[in-house]
Image (tube, grey):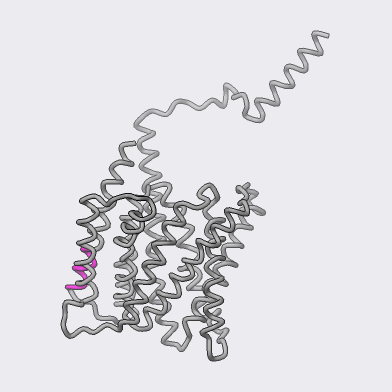
Amino acid sequence: MNDIMQAWSNYLFYKLRRNNVIASSKNQEKPINKKKKKYMIKGKVLKGVLFVVLGATSYGMLATFVRMAYNEGYTTAEATTSQFAIGILGLLAILLFKTKVKKQKLKKATRKEMFSLLIAGLSTGMTSIFYYLAVRYIPVSIGIVLLMQTVWIGVIVEMIVDGKKPGIAKIVAVMIVLIGTLMATNLIDADVHLDWRGVLLGLLAAVSFTTTMFASNKIAIRLAPIKRSLFMIMGGALVVFVFGLFTQVDPYNFQIFLKWGFVLALFGTIIPPILMNLGFPLCGIGLGSIVSSAELPVSVLMAYMFLHERVTAIQWLGILLIILAIIIMNLRLKNKLATK
């Protein structure tokens, strides 16, 4: 009887150790010294910064590609629908690769989470529509500046939704953004006249983009980035397809799927959301917001090089002021995160 009990005890101990309930003495991790831990944290932060920069750079290239598609006769409806259709297929392919090939177990989304992400994704579609329409009427270098008004719009939304009153640093930053915007859009030059439709659409894109940012930081954050991105893009596709259905007058030119659809999907709906969702948790919201401002100079440089848009020294100074404002707004938060 004792032999049977001993055998059963040994078997139970083996199963528990195998399932990591009881740690084997051989597999016990050695304590990590403070210096090594510090380097590991720095490595993660740098990795996160790299992901966010690449994601922001990808977004920055997008408007130039859209304008180039316009120059070839394609419409806004064709640009947006091809981007979202291929984007969904691309994200689905990545998700299937992770779950079927790599055998990764991802958390399942509840019906409530799926519905919430689909609704939140509506603003993603609206951002693309407003932004792409805006660059029909105004230069790309001006359009991106208007999109970056999310800096002060976000402060207002935060005050209304979360009841957070802006501090002195945020108020100063907002004033710098407004001054920088006047310079970056070259409105201080009396000879410059911007199409009011482009300005209005650019500001609507900023409002919509702010909504997307707030939603993506609060809804179903327990899910994997690829799943959250997929559901939000699917929500955006609903808006985009309805927009295309009611605005596409001429026969739909399916050639855009081959010429520009893949490029727009890659740089607009596949790379940025995945990299941003990977990078922000590693480097933090404050530092991530600072480095994501790389989108602004990248977009202006792309417009200068490929569309030959004229960018004056005053405009560059205004762009630098906007980036400075973003740094001022997030530097205090970054320091708080660093001390934790």
Which quadrant does the N terminus fall into?
Answer: top right
Report the residue at 56% width, 27% height from top: 27
Q: Main secondary structure of the magenta part?
A: helix
Placement of 51 over or under 240, stated as above or below: above
x, y percentage for residue 45?
A: 37, 46
| Stretch of the chain drawn in magenta | 314-321
* Residue 88 in picture, x, y percent from top left: 57, 67
Q: How far across and how far down the image is residue 127, in percent? A: 43, 70
In magenta segment, residue 316: yes
Q: In this view, does 8 lie to the left or right of 53?
A: right
**Residue shown at the point (35%, 42%) measured from the top left:** 42
For this view, does 163 lie left or right of residue 128? left
Q: Residue at x 20, y 56 (%)?
A: 172
Task: Identify which residue, 337 or 271, lies in the foreground.
Answer: 337
* Residue 118: % across, % down: 55, 62
On the picture, is 8 further left or further right than 89? Answer: right
The one of 87 and 14 positioned closer to us in this rendering:
87
Q: Name the outermost residue toward the right.
A: 1
Membership of 338 in magenta stretch:
no
